[in-house]
Image (spheres, rainbow, N blue to C red):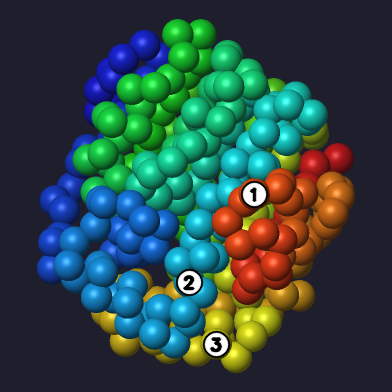
Amino acid sequence: MSALVGGGAQVLGAQPKVQFDVPHSARIWNYWMGGKDNYPVDRLAGDAVAAVYPRMGLLAKQSRQFLIRVVRFLAGEAGVDQFLDIGAGLPIMQNTHEVAHEIAPRARVVYVDNDPLVLTHARALLTHTTPEGATAHIGADCRDPDVVLAGARGVLDLDRPVAVMLMGVLGYVSDTDQVREIVARTMDAVPSGSYLALWDCVSTSKAMRAVEAAYARTGAMPYTVRDVDLLAGCFDGLDVVDPGFVSISQWRPEAGQVGGAIAVDGYGAVARKP
């Protein structure tokens, strides 16, 4: 089922019950970024992880800055006007459609997430779409690309280039082969000239390697911290744009952003499908 929300905006899929007593990844991430859409159980979990990795709040904020820079590049220099943001999380600041519509008002944006709280907040997220553009939110899981793509086809033209975004979500998939399959199947469904934008936490420090166990102890969905080379393999067969696969803080940094260009334990890249 779908509900119309303002001009050109939709919420697709039924809204399941929100669990207030179980920590959830999207709400924990919202807490680390300074948002308000979280509960005490999420804040306890977030603090437990930050105790072993004190820079988690900084990394979370830098991840949003990375997303903003990436979307500006894709909507501007790359000329993409269709975005599939998989694992979008809760709205907090300068979301994908807002950044894209500043540059390309006709852009069509589909958000995908399996968090019921994200679906609940989708109406607020979608009120800022442009009259000429389109924004939709699909309740689906990144582990099922067929469902994701079926929903996206209702809004996006998959015969034209699409920017596929997987921002900090693939750590929730424990099997690296499955991660690569998710990326490959999704990118196979979009045409030449499409882009993959991806980042995730990597095991580049002892503290980040400890995050995996700390996160599991909170009761939230387990998160896998991968080696850099394993995550970089997601871009095989694609043309990675400059500056390559790097710490997200060092991907085309801008002056005055939180944390500057100091390397963090989150790596990502943007790549074009030949």
Tell me if residue 269 comes above or below residue 179 in the rendering: above
| Disc 3 to disc 2, C-alpha distance | 10 Å
- Tell me: 242 left or right of 254: right
In this figure, which residue is indicated by the disc labeled 2?
Answer: 56
Count of number-bearing discs: 3
- The residue at the point 51 percent across, 57 percent down is 61
Q: Is the C-beta separation of discs 1 and 2 under 8 Å?
A: no
Name the amino acid type tagged 1: Gly
Q: Helix, strand or loop at disc 2?
A: helix
For the C terminus, the quadrant is top right
Tell me if residue 34 comes above or below residue 173 in the rendering: above
User: Which sits earlier in the primary sequence, circle 3 or circle 1?
Assistant: 3
Of marks 1 and 2, the one in the foreground: 1
User: Closest to the observer: 145 or 85?
Assistant: 85
- The residue at the point 54 percent across, 65 percent down is 59
Q: Helix, strand or loop at disc 1?
A: loop
- The residue at the point 28 percent across, 18 percent down is 4
In this figure, which residue is indicated by the disc labeled 1?
Answer: 256
User: Closest to the observer: 168 or 251?
Assistant: 251
User: Closest to the observer: 255 or 4?
Assistant: 255
User: Which sits earlier in the primary sequence, circle 3 or circle 2?
Assistant: 2
In this figure, which residue is indicated by the disc labeled 3?
Answer: 207
Residue sticking out furthest to the front: 256
Q: Helix, strand or loop at disc 3?
A: helix
